[in-house]
Image (cartoon, rainbow, N blue to C red):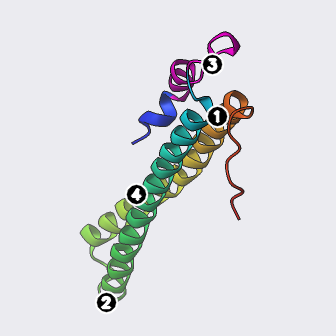
Amino acid sequence: MRNIDDRIVHSLNTTVPTVSFSGKVDASETCKQLYETMMEAHLTRDKAIKSCIAQTSEVMGQLREERAKDSDNLVLLRQLRKEQTKLKLMQSELNVEEVVNDRSLKVFSERCRIHYTPPKVK
């Protein structure tokens, strides 16, 4: 799901022309399309991660209720710890996602700032 972010530099190098080739390609349209694709990918990944977090939180809630009824069940305790670990990993993935998004936007703005100014995000 991070293909566009992993290849942002390559995409920019192949689609945004240098000064000598600027007349042959519409750089502003190219930058706009790349920006929209990038934002769509960011939103899709964000929704997927948050959906997984919500699902895992729900499972943890159920396991906690079961643990309250049967606190001596070792299988249940292991399962709860496993879900807690999964939740922590997913929450840290949100932080990783933020770093990846920031990096991509920085590279994008360095190459496309002359050709395209993205709308302000509120």
Label 3 neighbourhood size at 10 Å, few (<14), some (14-19), many (20+)? few
Circle nearer the viewer, 2 or 4: 4
Magenta stretch: dominant secondary structure: helix
Residue 42 visible (yes or no): yes
* Residue hosting label 1: 108
Q: Is residue 98 left or right of residue 78?
A: right
Marks 2/1 in contact by CB < 8 Å: the verdict is no
- The amino acid type of the residue labelled 1 equals Phe
Find residue 23 and name its label: 3
> Mark 2 vs mark 1: which is more N-terminal?
2
- The amino acid type of the residue labelled 3 equals Gly
Find residue 86 and name its label: 4
Give the CA distance from mark 3 to mark 1. 20 Å
Circle nearer the viewer, 3 or 1: 3
Q: Regarding mark 2 in the picture, which secondary structure is present there?
A: helix
Give the CA distance from mark 2 to mark 1. 53 Å
Residue 41, placed above or below residue 31: below
Q: Quadrant of the C terminus?
A: bottom right
Which residue is at the far bottom?
69
Q: Regarding mark 4 in the picture, which secondary structure is present there?
A: helix
x%, y% of residue 21?
62, 13
x%, y% of residue 61?
39, 80
Stretch in magenta: 8-24
Give the CA distance from mark 1 to mark 4. 32 Å
Which residue is at the far top?
20
Marks 3/4 in contact by CB < 8 Å: the verdict is no
Q: Regarding mark 1 in the picture, which secondary structure is present there?
A: helix
> Mark 1 vs mark 4: which is more N-terminal?
4
Circle nearer the viewer, 2 or 1: 1
Q: Is residue 90 left or right of residue 16?
A: left
* Residue hosting label 2: 69
